[in-house]
Image (cartoon, helix red, strand yellow):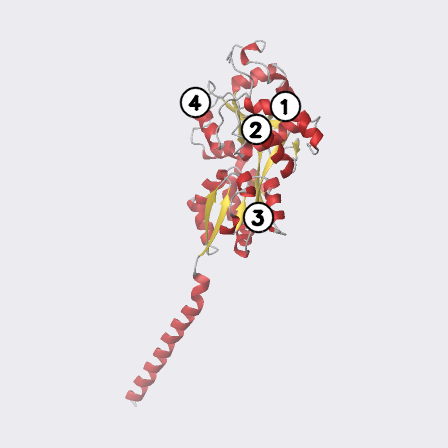
């Protein structure tokens, strides 16, 4: 009897072990990590490689691997066949990809307005010359129409200038318009103002604004191909090298949130009036790419992490909670960039003059 019970118990245990093994094998695919590859604008690389972001995706069984490229390159020359999503930094570039790849759905999980990183003495000097004023909220703006009036003059020609009597033109330092999305966003802003406060939308308007906007780039001399370059110069070299630097708001706010001392007491951020939002738009090229886009747009943890990098997320409340008084809740004076084709033609014409 005991022998029969022992045999019976052994059979039961054996069946239980087999069941566990079989169940484990059946469950194994769900527990595997899915690798999803994408191509992104370089300003988002720090976000995607942050260990907290990696862990947040891992909770959804996803590992995101990214390559970086300029938004223009992503839309025109990058082989997108190797990727499951494209994530440029501008909506015009995303719209071109969407049309070319016949994609019906896109995701815009975060965005960032353009701004100018500068210094308190420069702000006071520009304010005295009518180019800086108070915005609609508790922040200051650089009036682009007034700035364009000053851009043909040297700093040492401005009345009452004892703070920065440099013998160079009053120009915002940008990136290379042939390579960088931020320079294209700057072109969007200045072309809007030069076109009588209207989005450039015809060949006649392109010809009208081109000489003015090309000069703003060409007179700078050498420019770098990524926004990180001039921003790091701003942080390390001070007012002497670059008194005004075009940045994404997210870059400046990111440093303020970090509170790492890189933003010194004399440093200031001005919003351009008008400004343009750089809308980081993810174009899914596969179901897994679409899943990444949906998570970025809807997952609260990923949204909060994006806000800690200074990005304005789909939840204004979330950004306000993270950024606090480091950035205004909303910017009223914002305009849309031209179409991708118009931007391309303007940028190509500027490129020919280098």
Viewed as shown, does residue 350 lie left or right of 200? left
Viewed as shown, does residue 42 lie left or right of 158? left
Q: Earlier in the sequence, mark 1 or mark 3?
A: 1
The span from disc 1 to disc 2 (Cα, nearest Å) is: 12 Å
The span from disc 4 to disc 2 (Cα, nearest Å) is: 31 Å
The span from disc 2 to disc 3 (Cα, nearest Å) is: 30 Å
Mark 4 crowd level (few <14, some 14–19, many ≥20, 10 Å Cα): few
Q: Nearer the viewer, mark 4 or mark 3?
A: 3
The span from disc 1 to disc 4 (Cα, nearest Å) is: 31 Å
Q: Earlier in the sequence, mark 1 or mark 2?
A: 1
Disc sitting over residue 352 in the figure: 2
Q: Residue furthest bottom?
A: 1
Q: Earlier in the sequence, mark 2 or mark 3?
A: 3
Position of residue 239 relative to residue 79, above or below, is above
Picture coordinates of residue 20, whole percent (x, y):
39, 72
The span from disc 1 to disc 3 (Cα, nearest Å) is: 34 Å
Q: Nearer the viewer, mark 1 or mark 3?
A: 1
Q: Nearer the viewer, mark 1 or mark 4?
A: 1
Picture coordinates of residue 314, whole percent (x, y):
59, 44
Mark 1 crowd level (few <14, some 14–19, many ≥20, 10 Å Cα): few
Q: Nearer the viewer, residue 105 or 315?
A: 105
Viewed as shown, does residue 236 lie left or right of 285? left
* Displayed quadrant of residue 350: top right
Q: Residue furthest front?
A: 352
- Mark 4 secondary-structure assignment: helix
Instruction: Give the labeled residue for mark 4.
Output: 237
Disc 1 to disc 3: CB gap under 8 Å: no
Viewed as shown, does residue 151 lie left or right of 82? right
What is the total number of numbered labels drawn onto the structure image?
4
Position of residue 138 relative to residue 153, above or below, is below
Disc sitting over residue 283 in the figure: 3
Instruction: Give the labeled residue for mark 1.
Output: 211
């Amino acid at each position: 009897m005991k022998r029969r019970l022992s045999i019976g118990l052994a059979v039961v245990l054996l069946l239980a072990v087999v069941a566990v093994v079989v169940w484990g094998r059946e469950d194994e695919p769900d527990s595997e990590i899915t690798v999803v590859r994408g191509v992104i604008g370089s300003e988002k690389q720090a976000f995607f490689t942050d260990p907290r972001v990696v862990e947040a995706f891992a909770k959804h069984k996803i590992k995101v691997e990214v390559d970086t490229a300029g938004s223009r390159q992503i839309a025109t020359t990058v082989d997108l066949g190797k990727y499951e999503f494209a994530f440029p930094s501008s909506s015009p570039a995303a719209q071109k990809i969407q049309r070319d790849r016949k994609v019906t759905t896109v995701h815009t999980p975060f965005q960032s307005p353009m701004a100018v990183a500068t210094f308190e003495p420069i702000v006071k000097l520009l304010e005295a010359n009518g180019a800086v004023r108070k915005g609609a909220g508790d922040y200051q703006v650089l009036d682009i129409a007034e700035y364009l009036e000053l851009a043909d003059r040297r700093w040492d020609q401005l009345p009452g200038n004892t703070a920065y009597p440099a013998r160079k033109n009053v120009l915002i330092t940008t990136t290379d318009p042939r390579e960088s999305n931020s320079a294209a966003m700057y072109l969007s802003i200045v072309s809007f103002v030069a076109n009588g406060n209207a989005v450039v939308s015809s060949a006649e308007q392109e010809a009208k604004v081109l000489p003015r906007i090309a000069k703003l780039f060409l007179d700078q001399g050498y420019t770098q191909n990524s926004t990180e370059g001039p921003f790091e110069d701003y942080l390390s070299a001070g007012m002497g090298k670059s008194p005004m630097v075009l940045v994404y708001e997210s870059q400046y706010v990111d440093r303020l949130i970090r509170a790492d001392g890189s933003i010194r007491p004399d440093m200031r951020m001005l919003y351009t009036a008008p400004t343009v939002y750089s809308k980081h738009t993810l174009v899914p090229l596969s179901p897994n790419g679409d899943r990444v886009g949906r998570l970025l747009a809807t997952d609260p943890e990923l949204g909060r992490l994006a806000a800690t990098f200074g990005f304005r997320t789909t939840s204004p409340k979330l950004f306000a909670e993270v950024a606090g008084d480091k950035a205004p809740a909303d910017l009223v004076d914002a305009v849309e960039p031209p179409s991708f084709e118009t931007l391309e033609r303007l940028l190509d014409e500027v490129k020919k003059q280098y």
